[in-house]
Image (cartoon, grey):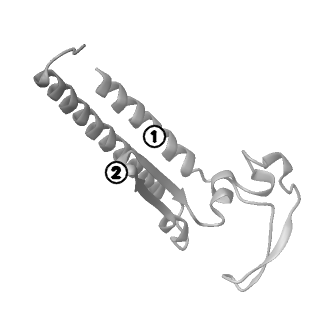
Amino acid sequence: MKIGNRKLQSAVAEFGDQILEEVRRIVVETAQLIQSEAKARAPVDSSNLRDSIEMEIFDGGLKAVVRVTAEYAIYVEYGTGIYAEGPGGSRAKKIPWSYFSPKLGKWVTTSGMPAQPYWNPAVDAGERYFRREMRRLGK
């Protein structure tokens, strides 16, 4: 049994290719948005954190990964010590402690540092963009 004809099959294939291209565009633009938002929101001291925000595209644009490779990124996002929020916040050190700062060349006493969210707000913005664009595509 055969349903349709060559023109119909060709039109369906072309429509599918157009949709696939739009999905690729949305995935890549979402990753670019997350990366640029995170970089714009990241606090800058030495710019190492901002420079460690990377993006990689896979599967011809159907998959994207945005990552932060700076080892201390989570501490900036969620804070430390008495200010810690999110993962591990309840287990954070609640008393002052001292450490030697090579940057300052002296011992420093601290109770921690407040959170400076840059990652989660960027991911939230990316999610809103992705959902909006995919809804628009479905209409």
Q: Is residue 28 above or below residue 72?
A: above
Separation of marks 2 and 1 at Cα, in angstroms: 23 Å
Element type at mark 2: helix
The tag earlier along the polypeptide, 2 or 1, is 2
Q: Which mark is residue 72?
A: none
Reading the image, the residue beneath label 1 is 125
Tell me if 105 is positioned left or right of 111 in this view.
Answer: left
Q: Residue 139 in the image: x percent, y percent?
A: 28, 20
Tell me if 8 is positioned left or right of 121 in this view.
Answer: left
Q: Residue 38 in the image: x percent, y percent?
A: 48, 53
Q: Residues within 10 Å of mark 2 (few under 14, many from 20)?
A: few
Element type at mark 1: helix
The residue positioned 18% from the left and 25% from the top of the image is 9
Q: Name the quadrant containing residue 57.
A: bottom left
Identity of the amino acid at label 2?
Gly
The residue positioned 76% from the left and 84% from the top of the image is 106
Identity of the amino acid at label 1?
Ala
Tell me if 10 is positioned left or right of 26 in this view.
Answer: left
Reading the image, the residue beneath label 2 is 60
Q: Residues within 10 Å of mark 1 (few under 14, many from 20)?
A: some
Foreground residue among 60 and 64: 60
